[in-house]
Amino acid sequence: MLFVLFVANEETYAVEAKLVIKVIPAVRLRHIPGSPDYVAGLFRYKGEVVPVLDLSRLLGEPGSTECLGTRILLVRYRGHAQSERILGLMAEKVIQTVRRDEADFDQTGVVSTIAPFLGKIACDPERMIQRIMIDRLFPQGLEAVLFPEE
């Protein structure tokens, strides 16, 4: 499988490349009053309003550093409603793509009820790489707010 690797809070994470539509530079986002702090805001992409989550904040850390390397991964999100939507994930830097077998990823031995989107971990000589499970990013209640039905 092909994965896109990115960094948040100096840790390496992976998203299946088949879920990534495009990687774009950080853009100006419209703030959503009253939203959780990990919801960075909204922007328009090809006529569609796209919510963006700050992965650093989602992981319980300070927000992503705004720098030249900050990127937004546009991903296919299928969540609870099962209809495909575009979701933006803000990362401090997108570093590369790698091929890894499913068997390379092992359970961590720790289940996080706060971060159910964190998946298995693969190790290589330089780092540990943890999978982000896109469809588990947020609860159904928030999904309904970010993706209201027409």
Image (cartoon, rainbow, N blue to C red):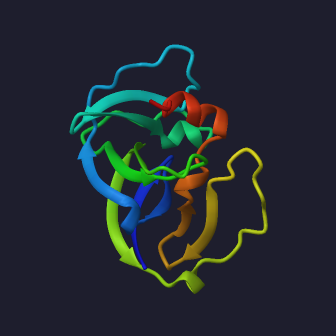
Is residue 146 shown above or below 102?
A: above
x then y, percent, for residue 34: 57, 15
Residue most extreme to the top: 33
x then y, percent, for residue 16: 44, 67
Res 59 → quadrant: top right
x then y, percent, for residue 50: 36, 35
Residue displayed at 51% across by 53% down? 78
Residue displayed at 66% across by 40% down? 139
Is residue 55 shown above or below 4?
A: above
Res 125 seen here:
yes
Residue most extreme to the left: 46
Residue displayed at 56% across by 22% down? 35
Q: The N terminus appears in which quarter of the rendering?
A: bottom left
Residue most extreme to the front: 150
x then y, percent, for residue 14: 47, 63
Res 37 → quadrant: top right
Is residue 79 shown above or below 45?
A: below
Q: Front-most of 108 and 79?
A: 79
Report the side of 69 relative to 75 (left or right). Answer: left
Residue displayed at 50% across by 30% down? 148
Res 4 seen here:
no
Q: The C terminus appears in which quarter of the rendering?
A: top left
Q: Front-most of 103 and 6?
A: 103
